[in-house]
Image: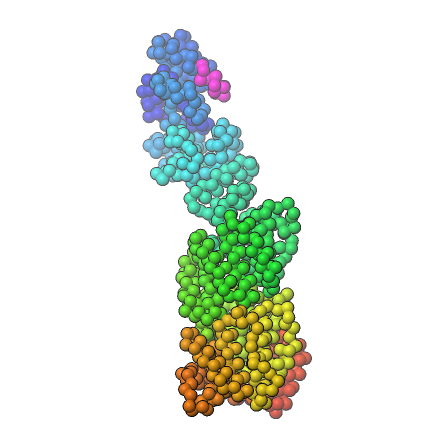
Amino acid sequence: MWQRPALIHYLSTLSSPIVALMGVAGMGKSVVLRQLAECCHSVVAEHLPDPAVFPPGQDLFWDPGSSSLKQQYQDAIRLLPQLKARQQRLFLTVDWQVRHEWLVEGLVYRDISVVEQSRLLFSLDEIMALGIEHPERCLADTGGWPVLVANYDRLSQPQFRRSWQDFIAARIINVLPLRLQRILLALALSPALTMQKHNLDGLVIGSLVPLIYCDNENRLHLGNAPLRQALVALAGEERSLYQGAMRLVAQDLWQQQSRFQAIVTAAQSNNVDLALSWFHQSGSGLYGHLHGFGELKSILHSFPAASVAQETSLAWARLEELLKAGDLVAARAFCDNSVLFHLSNLSSRQKALIRLMQLTLASYQSERYTDAKLDDMRALAPQLADEPLAYASLHNKLCLAHMTRGEWQQATVCCTVSLEWYRRMSADYLCFFAHFHLCRLACHQGFLDQARQHIALAETCLQRVPFRQSLTCERAFIAMGKSWLALYGGDTDEASVQWRQVRLAMDGLECWPELMAEFGWLSVLVCYLKEGLPAAWTILQDLRTRYAVSFPAADETLFVLYGAFLQQEAGYWRDAQTRLSTASLPAHTPLVLRMSQWLTLRGDVALLAQRHHSRGMKSPEFADEYRLTAAEKQLQRLVQARYYAISKQPDKLRECWLMAVNAAQHTGPGLPFLLERGAVAEVWSRLIDDPLRTVPGAGIVRWLQGKMPANPSEKSSMPTGLTPRQWLILQRLTEGLSNKQIANLSGISENTVKFHLKALFKYFSVNKRSQLIQVVQQLSN
């Protein structure tokens, strides 16, 4: 064994009656003791030596080996009086221990000197003196641990590694207290731990070198690489010890604000109780909305599948993740198969959260909200009062329910409540959605300035979302709000630009039936007003197919009504009325009923205009006027004005026109005047027939005349004697689609496509498909 003269000299200078060389196994205590005894021309005793047998002043050396540590202490202390009287010193080896009362007392009275194991480590100078190649590397690899320095050339050998692992398990881990075992293993499984977290003082840390050491930032680190390798291998065999160590690692990560890593670490190491507690504190079911859905997906995968299905917070989060991904089928299957939804012995809080999950799923399934269902939703509020995010989410669902019913003020109140809670929790992503909904509500109520403020705030909130780089469709929501604002303001160019951004993002857009239907109406209006009827028919068919695929159980009546509107604009008033009369409406939402009323009334008035009399028809009025949007009220006034013009009631005509003009002074003429430009032209011609009365609104009429021709279809020289289906097939034919592709996109059979093509060949007097495409392109140009 290599000689250590510097260490021997240091030991010889100690004056205490008892000198204890303390350290874990492998520190070379016995070797150093033998070298010191040889320098003193003495030997190391296996049993406690008797001071009286040796001359006064001669030092005694004792290596008790594996005898009882407690007995060692008692025997050594019993010799103190003799050692002092004969001016002798007793040098002995002891295994490492946390400070005991005997040791503390001995240190206080200077009866005992403890040589910590840090003193037993090889220094760089000692390693260099040994002639080892690359001494700095040796010191870094071994930490100066004598047993590793002695076997430095064998560290990479598999046989030594296995022996080393067994040595660590038997001679080191087993002699340490359980708490220190877990700390040591935790350090092997993580880069570092916070010292304060584990209540280890500096003396204990110093005595544990080279197993662990503390840096300048009070972070604990493992001593060396061979120790780490042995401990990691041991962790794979001792699962309970591994679980306890990983619990410490997870707790340390949580203390460092590493939320995501802490939850995943705890869940993967089967410390599910910790992971669930932290997950609940970090947002519970709305974790993805607060911290990102990528994080949420990883966290859910780290939990056992049974926990995700049975624990309320995890099940809620899983449902939100599936809905965010647009996988409605998987979301329904999850709720149907989850054990949680079928348990009876649940707390009131769990029942309320499950009901909230059911409401969340229902909002994606074209739910019809009756008064009873609204009362059921409101009854959940007291039960969720202690769950701020759940409480805010409930009010968000109430907002959507009221919007579906056309109750704009109630919807605004509920959305404002949810927004306030989201602000308190700094939930920027949820604030973004709340402002988006408030923008839509303000548009519905004609408060366009407020709508602009909300869409601007929505953009600001989105910029503050920490995980915004992973979001794909949220910009499309902003563009949708801006498109509506531009359209309500009559700016069809800007509305088209913003709408196209939404259209490009449709494949990844998170949608629910009410929003998808609203986007369908926006698309029809923008395409019709900007590009004409063929483009509007094409987009309507595309969106109707997408709607049917995305929401198989949802009703498509709104898309039927959109088609009736396009038929009216194409001049097929009777066909449109037939379509409206055959639609089944009694069980539908107020939105469907209001649109049906408007289309039916404008159709009736248009047919009256064609007959030039108004016999058999009363003044057109909408039911449930308090639920009408601001635009719908304007549309009603313009339809009524046209009726009064036809029925030759100048006073009522003027009164109705003045109401429409006064309302337009606050919001601008915008969308209602664009949609009813035919009615406006007819009304204006009747009003200016009376030269004795001044008629307001000339500026609106001039704006409308400069905005676009009386009918967008006049932009094209295409013939008008075609059915809507034939328009659609022509459009897709010019796009180069095959019969099968046209059939799939249009939701019809291939034979039906061929039937319409034959009719188109006959109409345009051609015999081939290529000739038909050429004729259509020439007419379009």
In this rendering, the answer to whether 535 lies above or below 359 is: below
Residue 766 coordinates in the image, percent (x, y): 61, 90
Is residue 105 visible in the rendered image? The answer is: yes
Residue at the spot 64% in from the left edge and 45% down from the top edge? 345
**Residue furthest out toward the right:** 751
- Front residue (pair 568, 275): 568
**Rendering colour mode:** rainbow
The residue that appears at 63% across and 51% down in the rendered structure is 341
- Which segment did they paint magenta? 65-75
Quarter occupied by residue 462: bottom left
In magenta stretch: residue 106: no
Closest to the observer, 249 or 454: 454
- Above or below, 410 relative to 720: above
* Identity of the residue drawn at 50% across and 52% down: 389
Image location (x, y in percent) of residue 609: 56, 87
Q: Position of residue 6 (x, y in %)?
A: 33, 26
> How many numbered callouts?
0
Tell me if 299 is positioned left or right of 555 in this view.
Answer: left
Above or below, comparing residue 142 to residue 76 in the picture: below
Magenta span main SS: helix
Give the residue displayed 53% in from the left and 88% down from the top. 648
Res 5 visible: no
Q: Give 458 or 475, whichever is nearer the viewer.
A: 458
Q: Is residue 271 left or right of residue 463?
A: right
| Residue 240 in the image: above or below residue 663 | above
Name the quarter where the N terminus is drawn.
top left
Q: Nearer the viewer, residue 207 or 708?
A: 708
